[in-house]
Image (cartoon, grey):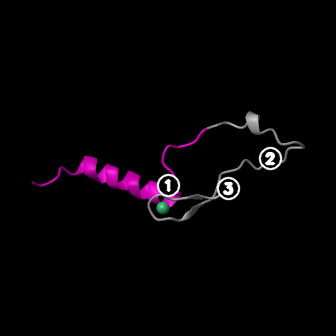
Amino acid sequence: MANRCMLCGRKIEPEEPKKLRPYVDEEDRPKKRPSMEVCTFCQAKLKHEADEAQKIPKPM
Ligand SMILES: [Zn+2]
């Protein structure tokens, strides 16, 4: 399963726990899925932009 970033189209590496299990239990996995698939780079960018927008009032 390769997710792609909605913003830049980059491949998002799934964060898998580094635990080796003797059997695969899909239902045991946490179903935490973000509504938006965005890579860490764009996430940081968005966060930064949101931060800046909050800090600096738009000059109008
Ligand atoms: Zn991206």
**Badge 2 or badge 3: first in the primary sequence:** 3
Q: Residues within 10 Å of mark 1 (few under 14, many from 20)?
A: many
Left or right: 1 with respect to 4?
right
Question: Which callout, 2 or 3, points to the residue nearer the camera?
Answer: 3
Classify residue 53 as left or right of residue 60: right
Which secondary structure, mark 2?
loop
Residue at image location 84% in from the left, 48% down from the top: 20
Image coordinates of residue 31 in percent, x first then y, are 64, 37
Left or right placement of residue 28 versus residue 54 in this view: right
**Which label sits in the foreground, 1 or 3?**
3
Any mark on residue 8, and which? Answer: none
* Residue at the image position 51 percent from the left and 52 percent from the top: 37
Question: What is the number of the mark on residue 38?
Answer: 1
Q: What x and y, as percent, mark residue 12?
A: 59, 59
Q: Residue type at mark 3?
A: Met
Residue at point 65% right, 54% down?
14
Residue type at the position of mark 2: Lys
The residue where tag 3 is placed is 1
For disc 1, does the CB lie below 8 Å from ligand 1?
Answer: yes
Within 10 Å of disc 3 (Cα), the crowding (few <14, some 14-19, many 20+) is few
Q: CA distance from mark 1 to mark 3?
A: 15 Å
First along the sequence among labels 2 and 1: 2
Q: Secondary structure at mark 1?
A: loop
Circles 1 and 3, Cβ within 8 Å, touching? The answer is: no
Residues drawn in magenta:
32-60
Nearer the viewer's eye, disc 2 or disc 1? 1
Gap in angstroms between the C-alphas marked 2 and 1: 25 Å
Residue wearing tag 2: 19
Q: Amino acid at mark 1?
A: Val
